[in-house]
Image (spheres, rainbow, N blue to C red):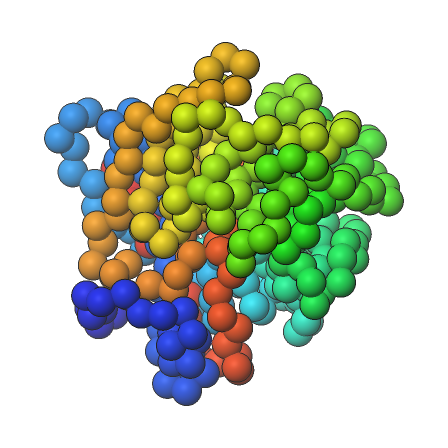
Amino acid sequence: MDVAPEQEEDAAEVAKEVAMSRRTLTFLTATAAALLAVLGGGAPAGADHADRVIVLPGATSAEGIASGAGSTFYAGDLFGGDIYRGDIRKGTAEKFIDNDPGRNALGLRVDLGDGLLFVAGGFTGQGYVYDLDTGATVASYQFADPAASVINDVAVTTDGAWFTNSFAAELYFVPVVDGVTGPFTTLTLSGPAADTTGGFNNNGIQATPDGSTLIVAHSTQGALNLVNPNTGASSTIAGVSLPSVDGFVLEGRTAYAVQNNLNQIAQVKLAGDLRSGTVTRSSRATSSQCRRRWRGSVTSWRRSTPTSTPASRPARPRTRSSSSTAEAVALTP
């Protein structure tokens, strides 16, 4: 791949190039092993971290990524809606789910216990549930009007899955009982998480292990908000400023947050009650291949806990190019 120019390009310009020149797009995918390594928690000091590129053959765009069993990962073609399955150790990937045109694939989350893969449907206003073994569609949900929604990310709890909408002050919950999905419900938000005055609002989402509290990243506010899953009431986690926050990983009381337009990953130490926190460390991506990037195309992957992070809203390509190839560039030990 050619080395990209130093200047940051506008998302619309990149989308135009996709349609007109069919150039290969490159996206930064930072694994949590990479998050910990880059931030100093996963490798000895001074360790050399080489870039790894995993090609998603035939994909026209790349977005969410989620860990499965062992070294298995799943990644989505944003505008094509197809799902890829690969091995992070072997550095390989192949198309797992070949969807008909019309679906999107943003945030992904694996439910290993129930054998399900949840996918946020982006600009379609939908969410999808796939069988983790066969790739068959288990359920499809029309959460909201496509003209007024971006279904962005998803978090899995012991009871089901929560989806965010970056254009509306609401979350959507899909219950799962004994591996069977049920009708979704809509949770209306109040407080800071209900703010939709910005261009792009609620984004990444995580849940505490017992599901009693949701944490939702708000891109416009540059904040993490606590959300009560029963009432929709929310409050901002004090002391945490994360401009351009996107998806994030929650490990105990430590969050690793992607700041997409800054091409940066931040480590946040949260208080025991989650009401406050401190940004303790941050690391910028250094790969020359990521200098020429599609805004918001940064996603994160945690091997030990299935999760995903979706991107901020990029411009839609005018056409899909069958000759395009999407790649995931992972910073790994």
Q: Nearer the viewer, residue 228 or 108?
A: 228
- Asked if one can make out residue 14 in the rendered structure from this viewpoint, the answer is yes
Residue 242 percent across, percent down from the top left: 40, 39
216 to 325, vertically: above or below: above
Rendered residue at 31%/69% (across/down) = 9
Residue 154 figure quarter: top right
The answer to whether residue 129 is left or right of residue 167 is: right
Residue 224 percent across, percent down from the top left: 51, 34
Residue 316 percent across, percent down from the top left: 53, 73
Rendered residue at 60%/37% (across/down) = 192
160 to 298, vertically: above or below: above
The answer to whether residue 175 is left or right of residue 4 is: right
Residue 319 percent across, percent down from the top left: 53, 82
Extreme residue in the left direction: 46
Extreme residue in the bottom direction: 20
187 to 233, vertically: above or below: below
Quarter holding the N terminus is bottom left
Extreme residue in the right direction: 183
- Asked if one can make out residue 96 in the rendered structure from this viewpoint, the answer is no
Rendered residue at 13%/30% (across/down) = 46
Extreme residue in the top direction: 272
Q: Nearer the viewer, residue 23 or 173?
A: 173
Residue 49 figure quarter: top left
Q: Nearer the viewer, residue 216 or 53?
A: 216
126 to 177, vertically: above or below: below
Rendered residue at 48%/37% (across/down) = 223
Q: How many marks?
A: 0
Quarter holding the C terminus is top left
